Image (cartoon, rainbow, N blue to C red):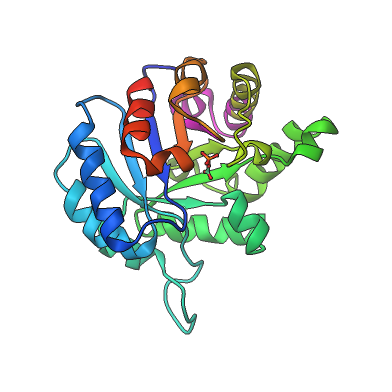
Amino acid sequence: MNKKRNRIVAGNWKMNMTYEDGRDLAMAIIDQLQPSETKVVLCTPYIHLRSVANIVNGISNMFLGAQNCHEAENGAYTGEISAPMLKSVGAHYVILGHSERREFFGETDELLARKVDQALQHGLKPIFCVGEKLEVREAGKHEELVAQQLRNGLFHLKPEQFREVVIAYEPVWAIGTGKTASPEQAQEMHRHIRALVAKKYKQEVADMTSILYGGSCKPSNAVELFSQPDVDGGLIGGASLQAGDFVAIIQSA
Ligand code: PEP
């Protein structure tokens, strides 16, 4: 892990936690957390955003994130939530392009590029997810696929916009499966991503881009994953729902 870049551990609660459970979880995380330079982002379902904003407000290096936003600013899109709405309740980050959104909600790279634009326009930092399915890795096409996801979803941005983006590499075969990428596999892909960013923008931009690893990250494997030179923290699903595990992962960063 490089000291120049922001170290970030983001928890993706997905569709879990009642209102009360969410509030209790956020408070338990704060109780157990030791001050550190790692930025912690709680990416909660929409219903929790306001209450968790009140809990994390004023705590240094703690931020609120959402898990999605719509590509339009407002309008007749029943059931949807826009970037300015998220900003208005105190969100700083938004996860975009999570593999579950790509898989279950048909989100394409082109749609995601529009969501990225909306998020940035309204002052939200995208945590942009990329990653391959198992068959793509087995066919040896994982680096090519991730390059395509980056080109289509992010590389239209100007350098000053790109600086606001966090990238999360999440191999789909590792998400929620208990199978983690080995530290070498994670490092290899993170180095590839950073090289692509350097080629498109400048090395200086690539050197400042935080690239998180996600996929069955837990206290027992976080130290090794986070010690890779191009791994700048993690996007954590299941283990972010237990305050003790999540805090242990943060402390590994
Ligand atoms: C995720 O869905 O972003 C994720 C990394 O999940 P898990 O940690 O449960 O594999």
Q: Is residue 203 above or below residue 139?
A: above
* Residue 159, horizontal then vertical, whole percent: 48, 40
User: Residue at the location (60% across, 22% down)?
Assistant: 191
With 154 as the anchor, is 81 left or right in this view? Answer: left
Name the quadrant of the N terminus: top left
The residue at the far bottom in this view is: 76
The residue at the far right in this view is: 139
* Residue 39, horizontal then vertical, whole percent: 31, 33
Q: Is residue 14 above or below residue 209?
A: below
* Residue 153, horizontal then vertical, whole percent: 61, 50
Magenta-drawn segment: 194-214
Residue 6 visible in the shown view: no
Nearest to the observer: residue 153 or residue 143:
143
User: Residue at the location (37% across, 63% down)?
Assistant: 46
Q: Is residue 252 above or below residue 244?
A: above
With 127 as the anchor, is 188 left or right in this view? Answer: right
The residue at the far left in this view is: 58
Q: Is residue 200 inside the magenta stretch?
A: yes
Q: Is residue 173 inside the magenta stretch?
A: no
Total marks in image: 0
